Amino acid sequence: MEMFNVFAKPTNDFNFMLKVGGEEVFVNGEKKLAIITNPDIKEFNDKYISTAFQTFRGDYVYYNGLYWMMWNQVTVPRAESYKGLMRQAEHDIIFNLYYAGVTSNYLLKCPAIIQRTSDYTPRYDKMMTLVDSEIHVFVKDTSSTRKINNLVGSNQIVIGERNYDIVGVSYEKRGYLDITCRMSTRNSGTDLVNNIYWSGEKPADWQDNYDLTFYGREGVTPSKPSAPDQLQTNVGAITATIVNQTDAGLGVITFNWSHDATKSVYSGFNGYKLRLIKDGSEIASLNTTSVSQVFSNLDAGTYSIEISILFTTYGVSEGSFPQVSEVFTITSEASKPMPPTDYVTNVSNLNITGVGETSSDGDGVVTFTWNKDTTAEQYSGFVGYELMRTYGSNYSEWSAVTLDKETTSYQWTGLYEGQWSGKIRVKFVNDGIVTYGTYEWFGIVTIQDNFGGSPW
């Protein structure tokens, strides 16, 4: 008979229980086995978790289709196992680290536990006493969540269509961040559908910049739902730039739009199907993953574009309902008279401003703005402008750029201190022959030396 050592740790019983009654969990994304039991019923949805490995306060546990957070440190075993308490992370909070200087994957989504400090908290101002509602938001302490510190006092989160100011971050208990938030006023720019705070215009590619690190699971490919039937395409406002290039009436339309939000919501997103409509009939169809498309060699007429979403969930299928742009017109240049040989450029509100140098590298900036020459549109071949800038009072140094007819501003960079000026004229192209109108002059602006030295 094998001798029994009363001083040895019993290690077989718990491992046997794990094999027989253990459940699959993911701890910080790593697949593990654990025994889950229920404590007494309380306000929060808590469960005991027993493991053969250490867990730490703030660890995320995926169990039974839900995310939980370890609520205590479990670094010392109890006999054969490590037993701790985990609490359901009932909320998913998005911290917009775009305002913390993060340039990619800046929408940090975190499973979070929220606790209320009190219904109302008095705050004493110089003139009056204010009453606020505060909450505590708990998320795992990592290098990415620590960037939330850079949002304190200047940023918000969105919970249940309410905005909350981020007013402080505490590290009192190791393993998670205790973020204090105070209810604030709703911002008109806030995305209440996706619960994202924006203080200004959204970047065009914001849907591609979610950080879903905390939701990763070993051996499990993150799944998105399939796109529903009768989905309405929504790519925002569809804009167009039109250029009538030749007297034969051939023109160019450049369409621009924004990505549909379903790009990040449903599985199998594969771009867009475009249909170009001329005078009510389809003349071109193509697929693209871009948010811009150029159509050239177009005759005079009225044009619109239909945009549908493409998904590859079941082969390649279109979004059920396309979005149709407004109608844009290309006017035949052949029906317009040729411009006079002495055409007088008719731009207005010419303005020139300058920003001084901050180093000896010549980093001054001059900005030219003007109003479009609408008279030039009456003549054949109007394609844009030639803008020239000059340095010094004798106008001896010239540089020129050619701009399309929709452009009404241009910024010249890399300039040294001194006096700068410029002039502008319209440009016509007919049968390959280029002609210009007369010049209109801007004023003079002086670039100052703001770095205390001389570029020479």
Image (spheres, helix red, strand yellow):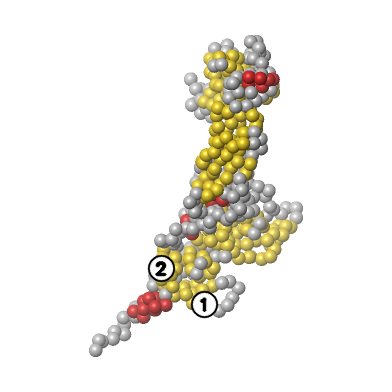
The residue depicted at 55 percent of the width and 65 percent of the height is 89
Q: Residues within 10 Å of mark 2 (few under 14, many from 20)?
A: some
Q: Secondary structure at mark 1?
A: loop
Tell me which amino acid carries mark 2: Lys
Disc marking residue 32: 2
The residue depicted at 34 percent of the width and 79 percent of the height is 12
Q: Is residue 282 above or below residue 24?
A: above
Q: Picture coordinates of residue 332 (x, y %)? A: 64, 23
Q: Picture coordinates of residue 72 (x, y %)? A: 49, 69
Q: Secondary structure at mark 2?
A: strand
Q: Residues within 10 Å of mark 1 (few under 14, many from 20)?
A: few
Residue topped by disc 1: 38
Q: Looking at the image, which is closer to me, 15 or 128?
A: 15
Residue 326 located left or right of residue 455: right
**Does the CB distance between marks 2 and 1 fall below 8 Å?**
no
The residue depicted at 58 percent of the width and 55 percent of the height is 229
Residue 8 located left or right of residue 69: left
The disc, 2 or 1, on the residue closer to the chain's N-terminal end is 2
Point out the residue furthest to the front here. Answer: 281
Q: Looking at the image, which is closer to me, 274 or 169?
A: 274
Q: Looking at the image, which is closer to me, 175 or 55?
A: 55
Q: Can residue 47 be seen in the rendering of this structure?
A: yes
Point out the residue furthest to the right here. Answer: 128
Q: Picture coordinates of residue 445 (x, y %)? A: 62, 21
Q: Picture coordinates of residue 433 (x, y %)? A: 55, 14
Tell me which amino acid carries mark 1: Asn
Residue 15 located left or right of residue 302: left
The residue depicted at 51 percent of the width and 74 percent of the height is 47
> Could you tell me how far apart the alpha carbons at marks 2 and 1 are, in whole angstroms?
19 Å
